[in-house]
Amino acid sequence: MTARALDAEINKFLPLLGKEEKLSLLGVIKSFMHLKKEEAHRISIDQYNDEIDEALAQVKTGNYVTHEELEKEMEQW
C-alpha cells in the first residue's frame, strides 16, 4: 500500500472517531514523531567508540569523580 493510499484510508476513518479516540491517536502519532526525531540524532558506531576511548583515557589519567565525591557535591545543591 502506498503512502497516499494509507493517508486516504486513515482520512476515511478519522471522522468516525470520537474526541477521546482522536486524542489517543494523536498521542500515538506524536510518540512516533518523537522516536523519529531521536533516531535522527543518533551517533555513528565510530563516534560512539571514540567517546568510549576518550572516557577510558580520562579515567586512566585520574580525571573522574568518585561516587563518594559526587554524593558530597550533591549535598551542596
Image: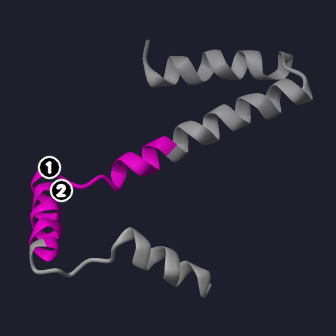
Residue displayed at 42% across by 50% down: 38
**Disc 1 on helix, strand or loop?**
helix
Answer with left or right where residue 10 lies relative to residue 64.
right
Residue 71 within the segment the image draws in magenta: no
Residue displayed at 84% across by 19% down: 17
Residue displayed at 34% across by 56% down: 41
What quarter of the picture does the N terminus occupy? Answer: top left
The answer to whether mark 2 and mark 1 are in CB contact below 8 A is yes
- Name above or below for residue 4 compared with residue 50: above
Answer with left or right where residue 14 lies relative to residue 77.
right
Q: Main secondary structure of the magenta part?
A: helix
What quarter of the picture does the C terminus occupy? Answer: bottom right
- Name above or below for residue 2 compared with residue 72: above
Q: Given the current orientation, which residue lies at the most extreme top position?
A: 1
The dot on residue 45 is 1
**Whole-percent x, y for residue 34 in the image:** 53, 46
Q: Type of residue at label 2? A: Tyr
- Name above or below for residue 37 compared with residue 51: above
Along the viewing direction, whichever of 17 and 49 lies nearer the viewer = 49
Residue displayed at 69% across by 23% down: 11
Residue 52 within the segment the image draws in magenta: yes
Range of residues picked out in magenta: 35-59
The dot on residue 26 is none
Q: Which residue is mark 2?
A: 48
- Name above or below for residue 19 compared with residue 8: below
Label 1: how many residues lie within 10 Å, few (<14), some (14-19) or many (20+)? few
